[in-house]
Image: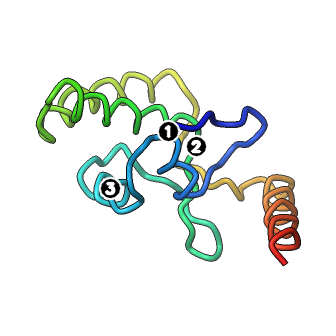
Amino acid sequence: MVLIPAEKIYFKIGEVAEAVGVRTSVLRFWETEFSFLKPVKSGSGQRLYSKNEIDLLLQVKQLLYDEKYTIEGVKKKLSSKVRRAGNDSTDCSSSPYDDKTSLLKTVRSELILLRESL
């Protein structure tokens, strides 16, 4: 498992898969099974996960793999927890691009990564 950098707000699916310790296909499957997992998508369609979603994914993994819950059991256990947390926090359905500054920072960081890979 990899530590999540504190300065980042959103993480790509490959980074999240490595941090959680599962394959990207497992993450995509979990998205179809658990309605509380809804990563936003970038303009290019790439999934972007928040730190809260990574925490949820770690909980899902622990419940499924360590505590041997069924998928339905995880849905019941975490859906009520997510609803309660949603009442206490701000709207989670907003896009990371609602704020133009956030969009520019994301584009800049992706351009830097692209430049470094050349």
- Mark 1 vs mark 3, foreground winner is 3
Q: Residue 101, position in %: x, y? A: 86, 54
- Mark 1 vs mark 2, foreground winner is 1
13 vs 85, left or right, is right
Seen from the viewer's position, the closer of residues 23 and 13 is: 23
66 vs 22, left or right, is left
Circle 2 residue? 50
First along the sequence among labels 1 and 3: 3
First along the sequence among labels 3 and 2: 3
Q: Are marks 1 and 2 in contact (CB under 8 Å)?
A: yes
Q: Residue 90, position in %: x, y? A: 58, 32
Q: The disc labelled 1 sits on which kind of residue?
A: Ile
Q: Residues within 10 Å of mark 3 (few under 14, many from 20)?
A: few
Q: The disc labelled 3 sits on which kind of residue?
A: Val
Q: Are marks 1 and 3 in contact (CB under 8 Å)?
A: no
Say above or below: 50 vs 29: above
Circle 1 residue? 54
Quarter of the image where one finds residue 41: bottom right
Q: Secondary structure at mark 3?
A: helix
Quarter of the image where one finds residue 50: top right
- What separation in Å lies between label 1 and label 2 (alpha carbons)? 6 Å
Count of number-bearing discs: 3
Q: Residues within 10 Å of mark 2 (few under 14, many from 20)?
A: some
Q: Secondary structure at mark 2?
A: strand
Taking the spot 78% from the left edge, 53% from the top edge, the residue there is: 99
- What separation in Å lies between label 3 and label 2 (alpha carbons)? 17 Å
Circle 3 residue? 26
Q: Residues within 10 Å of mark 1 (few under 14, many from 20)?
A: many
